[in-house]
Image: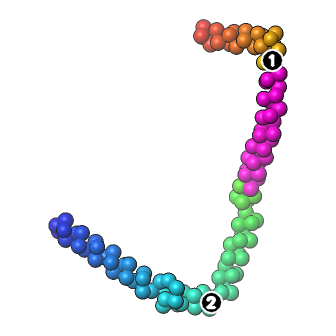
C-alpha cells in the first residue's frame, strides 16, 4: 500500500470516528441518553458495588499504611520547616562569635586534610 493510500485510509478512519462521536455522544445525543438510562436502571447495584469497594479500601492495610506514611512525611516536613528558623538563628550567632568561627574553620580544615590524605 502506498503512502498516499495509507494517508487517505487513516483520514477516512478518523473522519468516521469523529462523526460517530459527534452524532452519538454529547448533550442530548442518543448514546448519552442510553448510558444515562442504563446507569439509572442499575443505580442500586452500582451503589452497592461502590460501597463495597469503598469499605474494603478504607479497611485495607495498604490504605492505612499509605495514610500513615503521608502523615509522617508531612509531619516531618512541618517540623523541619519550623526548626529551620531556629537552626539559622543559632548558626548566625555561632558565626558572629570570632573565636567560635575560627574554631569552626580549623575543624573544617582538619576534616578536609583527613579526606585529602586518604
Region rendered in magenta: 67-94
Is the C-beta separation of discs 1 and 2 under 8 Å? no
Could you classify mark 2 by the number of other residues whose Cα lies within 10 Å: few (under 14), some (14-19), or many (20 or more)?
Answer: few
Residue 107 in view in this figure:
no
Instruction: Please tell me which residue lies in front, 104 or 112.
Output: 104
List the residue tagged with mark 2: 40
Give left or right: position of 18 versus 52. left
- Could you tell me which residue is drawn at 23 percent across and 73 percent down? 8
Residue drawn at (52%, 85%) of the image: 27
Return the x and y of residue 5 as percentages of the image width and height: 19, 71
Q: Is residue 9 visible?
A: yes
Figure disc tally: 2
65 and 100: which one is in front? 100
Residue 90 is one of the magenta-drawn residues: yes
Q: Main secondary structure of the magenta part?
A: helix
Q: Which image quadrant is residue 108 in? A: top right
Sequence order check, earlier mark of 1 and 2: 2
Residue 59 sits inside the magenta stretch: no
Secondary structure of the residue carrying tag 1 is helix
Q: Residue furthest left?
A: 2
Quadrant of the rendering where the N terminus is positioned:
bottom left
- Compared with residue 75, is residue 16 higher up or lower down, i.e. above or below? below
* Residue placed under numbered mark 1 in the picture: 96
Q: Is residue 104 above or below residue 77?
A: above
Percent coordinates x, y for residue 17 in the rendering: 37, 78
Amino acid at each position: 500500500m502506498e503512502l498516499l493510500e495509507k494517508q487517505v485510509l487513516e483520514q477516512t478512519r478518523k473522519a468516521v470516528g469523529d462523526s460517530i462521536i459527534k452524532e452519538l455522544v454529547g448533550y442530548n445525543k442518543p448514546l448519552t441518553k442510553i448510558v444515562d438510562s442504563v446507569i439509572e436502571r442499575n443505580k442500586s447495584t452500582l451503589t452497592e458495588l461502590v460501597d463495597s469497594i469503598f469499605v474494603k479500601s478504607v479497611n485495607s492495610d495498604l490504605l492505612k499504611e499509605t495514610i500513615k506514611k503521608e502523615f509522617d512525611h508531612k509531619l516531618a516536613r512541618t517540623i523541619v520547616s519550623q526548626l529551620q528558623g531556629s537552626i539559622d538563628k543559632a548558626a548566625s550567632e555561632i558565626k558572629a562569635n570570632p573565636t567560635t568561627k575560627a574554631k569552626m574553620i580549623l575543624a573544617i580544615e582538619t576534616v578536609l586534610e583527613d579526606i585529602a590524605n586518604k
